[in-house]
């Protein structure tokens, strides 16, 4: 349950950092402060993975929350820039009342392949840690959760974005 709580906190922080980063960069014309908040996004992801590794090292059993953190990291790294551009576009539209010409990349298959690859790498790291601790567990049993989250992600995001 702790890992799931951390995932929710990281997701909230992602959006806070993204909005503040774009806000300070675009609206207040403080690009250094905006860049500071945008740099916090990958640090947020990195800390989530560290928390997962620590939880496994101290003996917490592997569960779907650990798997979700791998998925979260994969989606954030693969689509983070696209999401930041989307937020930037929304703020620009409010600020100037016109939309920037931005081609949404959420539909690009190569980005989704990158997200899947990152997920599989994270699951492999978790499996190695569990194996070294003498508690082998098939971390890839979490793939059904990956499929469910993939469908939810598609239904709440790319399905509604106009190309």
Image (cartoon, rainbow, N blue to C red):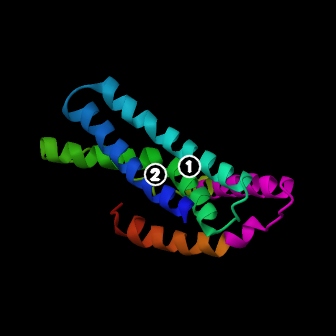
Q: Which residues are magenta?
A: 115-142
Q: Which quadrant of the figure contains the C terminus?
A: bottom left
Which of the 4 image quadrants contains residue 47? top right
Predominant secondary structure, magenta span: helix
Q: Residue at x 15, y 47 (%)?
A: 94
Which of the 4 image quadrants contains residue 72? bottom right
Tag 2 secondary structure? helix
Q: Which residue is mark 2?
A: 10
- Report x, y in % for residue 70: 61, 57
Inspect the magenta stretch and tell me whether residue 133 lies in it. yes
Q: Residue at x 76, y 55 (%)?
A: 124
Q: Which residue is mark 1?
A: 48
- Report x, y in % for residue 57: 73, 51
Inspect the magenta stretch and tell me whether residue 26 lies in it. no
Is the C-beta separation of discs 2 and 1 under 8 Å?
yes
Residue 103 in view in this figure: no
- Report x, y in % for residue 1: 55, 66
- Seen in the picture, residue 9 relative to 24 is either above or below; the reply is below
- Specify whether 94 is left or right of 18: left
Q: Earlier in the sequence, mark 2 or mark 1?
A: 2
Q: Residue at x 42, y 48 (%)?
A: 82
Residue 26 in view in this figure: yes
Residue sticking out furthest to the front: 58
The number of callouts visible is 2
Task: Give 95 or 124, whichever is nearer the viewer.
Answer: 124
Q: Residue at x 56, y 52 (%)?
A: 73
Separation of residues labelled 2 and 1 (CA atoms): 7 Å
Task: Give 118 or 96, whichever is nearer the viewer.
Answer: 118
- Specify whether 35 is left or right of 67: left
Q: Residues within 10 Å of mark 1 (few under 14, many from 20)?
A: many
- Seen in the picture, residue 132 relative to 60 is either above or below; the reply is above
- Report x, y in % for residue 98: 16, 46
């Amino acid at each position: 349950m702790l890992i799931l709580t951390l995932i929710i906190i990281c997701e909230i922080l992602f959006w806070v950092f993204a909005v503040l980063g774009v806000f300070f960069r675009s609206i207040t014309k403080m690009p250094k402060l905006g860049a500071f908040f945008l740099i916090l996004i990958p640090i947020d992801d990195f800390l989530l993975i560290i928390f997962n590794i620590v939880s496994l090292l101290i003996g917490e059993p592997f569960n779907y929350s650990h798997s979700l953190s791998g998925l979260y990291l994969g989606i954030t790294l693969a689509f983070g820039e696209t999401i930041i551009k989307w937020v930037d576009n929304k703020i620009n539209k409010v600020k100037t009342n016109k939309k920037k010409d931005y081609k949404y990349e959420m539909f690009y298959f190569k980005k989704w392949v990158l997200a899947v690859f990152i997920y599989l790498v994270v699951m492999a790291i978790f499996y190695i840690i569990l194996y070294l601790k003498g508690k082998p567990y098939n971390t890839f049993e979490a793939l059904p959760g990956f499929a469910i989250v993939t469908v939810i992600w598609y239904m709440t995001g790319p399905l509604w974005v106009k190309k």
